[in-house]
Amino acid sequence: MSTLRYGLAALLLSATTLTAIDAEARTLRWARSQDATTLDPHSGNTGPNHVMGHNLYEPLVIRGFDGKLQGALATSWRVLPNDPTVWEFKLRPNVKFHNGNAFTADDVVFSIKRAMKPAADMKSLLVSVEDAIKVDDVTVHLKTKGPNPLLVNNLTNLFIMDKEWSEANNAADPQNLKEKTENGATRNAVGTGPFTLVSREPDVRTVMKRNDAYWGASEYNHGVTEIVYRPIPEAATRVAALLSGEIDYLQDVPVQDIQRLQNSQGIRVNAGPENRPIFLGMNMGLPELRSSDVKGKNPFADVRVRQAINTAINREAIQRVTMRGQSEPIGIIATRFINGYDKAIDTWPKNDVAAAKKLLADAGYPNGFSVTLHTTNDRYVNDEGIAQAVVAMLGQIGIKTTLVAHSLRVHFPGIQRGEYDFYLLGWGIPTFDSHYVFNDLYRTKTPSAGTWNGTGLSDPELDKKIDSLNSEVDQNKRNATIAEIWQWIKANDVYAPIHNQFIAGAMRQEWNIPTDVENTPKMKFLAGSRS
Amino acid sequence: MFAYLLRSLSQATLVMLAVAFIAFSMFRYVGDPVASLVGTEATIKDREELSRSLGLDDPFPIQFVRFLANAAQGDLGISYRQGRPVVDLILERLPATLELALLSAALAFIVGLGLGVYTALNRRGVLANIVMSLSLVGVSLPTFLIGVGLIFLFAVNLRWLPSFGRGETVAFGWWTTGLLTESGRKSLIMPVVTLGFYQLTLIMRLVRAQMLEVMRADYIRFARARGLTERTINFRHALRNTMVPVVTIAGLQLGSVIAFAIVTETVFNWPGLGALFVRSVEVVDIPVMAAYLMFVGLVFVVVNLVVDLLYFALDPRLRGATAVPAR
């Protein structure tokens, strides 16, 4: 009897193992709020486009879920020892495009030059590049205008296209909006990526299947045989689709639904910090604030006022109440993922109303003052809620804040034109280096730098230091300058950093997709086995 | 009749021009399209160049006249967001919206008419009273809530129907339909009910009120005295005479069902024109927004015109009325 039972058990066991192997062939039904605007890998420089691109195309270098840099189409890269203005990339041999064409240095040169054309938004990442040169079939040199030790960080979303296919299919140039016709690469894709395109209906459905000829097929055992990507803009519908079992994986989970999803049967929620600090900017460069009752002088020009604001903000309360735990407070506009991050200076003043009031009084504003705070209401996790909390906290020290919440399409141009006295902004750091923070947020505003510096800060000494980072190839010297700049920033409180927001992904229990610090999950890095 | 048509057409052109003008003067307040076209790394110089190349820094009258001139030649421009011709986008989305709108209108008209007649004839019936109370829900509940409620009941809890999208569709040339596949039909049920519910209750209440009014009229009493069957009285004499206002309202509602499927399409992620418009507003895709608003204007103008003509056909007295001044 018992032998029979064991026999049956063994049979059952082998049967389940068999199904487990079968189940390895699986479709990932993936939804998020937005679709890629186009499949053209060089047209747009936005998150959803890159997320889609990483399935179909590949860059030379890539970042894993943890943000660590590794080779994709390049196997090694270095700055030439005898010429700091040249980056050398050794290319992966025996790689084929989806159409069977061989991947060579010509394709890399073509793609880099294509991405530098005026109609390509990706050109912003290649401003320092002067030329791309083929040395031999597996070696490419990128010549920069001056030494650029950071160039490799700008290439993680720069996808390589097939030169031959692009030229034959009206895709040699990125889509130009002045043209009246559609570009060949807008809805088609021939890359080297781990998935090939099956069908594309913009805003509705994009189907991809595993690329069986992928060079890394054995190395990356992700087990995903098919991806069905469906954008669902409406948050409630998105969550319902996951709960009803029509979706396996959901990006952009609304904060208010995280708890409920965690408590749902068969649903897993993975949350973690994104590489994107949220902070407040104070316009200290104006002679007089436009929205304040203080006339003839600018309260924000006084560092004590900026310190008072930093002290009045209760970051822990914002984390607990507004963000429901889905954030980590910060004291500098940086995350632990980036080069130059120093835990010692990532501190913030303890929330203290009396101390903040005293700082205001010392600065000559014992009764506070009035000011208008501008924020987005459609860009960051709970952006408007954060701003409302700040308004209440500043009210405690006598700063009467009027809140204006609007769309990012109105907000961002306003910051770039320096139109706001006081504003909320978030800053992703895709190069994973402090320079990206300094150059856009702290450097003097010019047509080509300090684009997002809406504070009016302009310090020639600081600018010189920031610019020196562009060309300093000695890592130790460079990092020393970065540390100096952070010290200056810490002393001057130009911004009021609030927190680093978390991103959450929800999925059916049988999947375990980690959060990606750049919010561009690459499915080839998934662990293959079912959990 | 011909003069009337001519007058209507010239009025329609004026309405379309006014729609275009109002739409265009509003676009400036929606935001700057450049902000959503380029990544954060783009410098101020890059942004200004793009803005110039799209003609966004031209004064408002120039932008408006340029749009009109191009639109008159059938060129609605290229979508900023997708880099594809706007005409293609609209044609691609039109079948989804029309299928949804026409089915909803049919549901509203047929069921609304049937229930309206039923509740009018059985004024004191228990079932009629239940239907009447339920119809209050339809009139007062916002579409959004009905949609979300249906999703949670039939998709999340019971898992009978898909919560979003159109399912599998079959294409005939540029037209696509979900009616020929099972998943397509299943996907249609909840959006059609959601979109048609308000219209259904409206038509039902209207038919009922009109029927009750007509049933009190003398000719119904005479008809009864003549010994006609109830059936003939109800359907030949009473119902017919309630149809003029009902057709007017139903026709006008068809226009708003097509034009304002926006909410339903958003809730069910229905790939129609309304959803396209919402996505376009989010990124300030001016060519698509302009084309959509012109389309909605056109739908209303055409529906109004058709309803006016139907009115003539249904009510002989009106024909006489316009005949007098025309002579």
Image (cartoon, coloured by chain):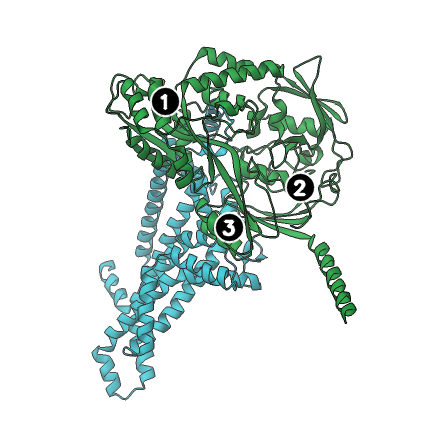
The image shows residue A1 at horizontal and vertical percentages of 77, 72
Which residue in the rendered view is the most extreme toward the left? Answer: B218
Horizontal arrangement in the rendering, residue A285 relative to residue A26 (left or right): left
Q: Name the tint of chain A in the rendering.
A: green
Cα distance, mark 3 to mark 1? 39 Å
Q: Nearer the viewer, residue A270 or A238?
A: A270
Q: Nearer the viewer, residue B327 or A376?
A: A376
| Residue B52 badge | none
Up/down of A344 relative to A499, above or below: above
Q: Check the residue under mark 3 and report the chain it is in.
A: A
Residue at the image position 28 percent from the left and 17 percent from the top = A297
Residue B198: quarter of image: bottom left
The chain displayed cyan equals B
Q: Amino acid at mark 2?
A: Lys
The image shows residue A212 at horizontal and vertical percentages of 74, 45
Residue B26 is at least partly visible in this image: yes
Tag 2, which secondary structure?
Answer: helix
Residues at discs 3 and 1 in contact (Cβ within 8 Å)? no
User: Label 2 belongs to which residue?
Assistant: A524
The image shows residue B103 at horizontal and vertical percentages of 45, 63
